[in-house]
Amino acid sequence: MADQEERKLNPEESLRLIRETIDLAKNRVRENGFQFLLWGWLVVIASLTNYWLVTLGFAYGKANLVWMVMPVIGVPASLIYERFKGRRYRDNNIVSKWYGLVWLGFAVALGLSLVLAVRMNVSPIPLILILAGFSTYLSGILLRFNALIAGGIVLWIGAAACIYLPWEIHVLVQAGAIVLGYLVPGYLMNAQVRKAHA
């Protein structure tokens, strides 16, 4: 009987508990600033390398092979990081689940968009920026982190700019949009987590 009475919470205590759970989830998920930094740097390096190879005279087909290196580095690094993070934090909260589902949806949509772009012989970069913008924007809303919301908007602006620019410039637009849309928020997230743990 005493246990049952201890488990009953008044409305204020319930709201406080919910708020603390969400704050805990936000802090745990925000450590994924690592993922924004990892993928941000990989995309920027691949974009600039791709542009450089084209300016050296490599055919687009050969210059685009640089993109094959990105997942070879990024996927194992992401999986190792997430596995290590999972050992430190066993929480399986709703914000973490939603956050993971947003990026799972991004990965599926990205794969389909890349196949579609190749089949239709169109630049995949505007599609990538639209999808990355949506996922980043939604992540910012979930985490209540304005830098991610702004990052998503920057990625959309980059996609819109590609409509009016030649294909050769798309990789430069992508590099710039990713710097502002992924790297800046990623570093801000990283700094916030470090400050919280200091």
Image: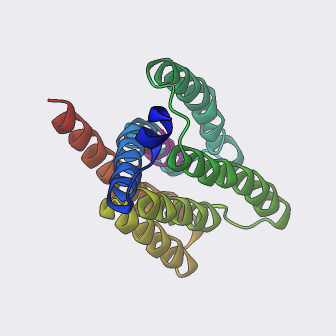
Q: Quadrant of residue 172?
A: bottom left
Q: Quadrant of residue 190?
A: top left
Total numbered labels: 0
Q: Residue at x 64, y 45 (%)?
A: 64
State the residue in front, 97 or 117. 97
Picture coordinates of residue 147 (x, y %)?
31, 61
Q: Is residue 33 visible?
A: yes
Picture coordinates of residue 175 (x, y %)?
43, 54
State the residue in front, 153 or 122. 153
Judged left or right of residue 171, residue 119 is right
State the residue in front, 47 or 7. 7
Q: Is residue 151 magenta?
A: no
In the rendered view, would you say 109 is above or below 7?
Answer: below
Residue ranking furthest to the bottom: 164
Q: Is residue 165 visible?
A: no
Q: Residue at x 53, y 82 (%)?
A: 164
The residue stretch that appears in magenta: 39-50
Picture coordinates of residue 161 (x, y %)?
48, 77
Q: Residue at x 44, y 42 (%)?
A: 5
Judged left or right of residue 26, residue 192 is left
Picture coordinates of residue 19 (x, y %)?
36, 54
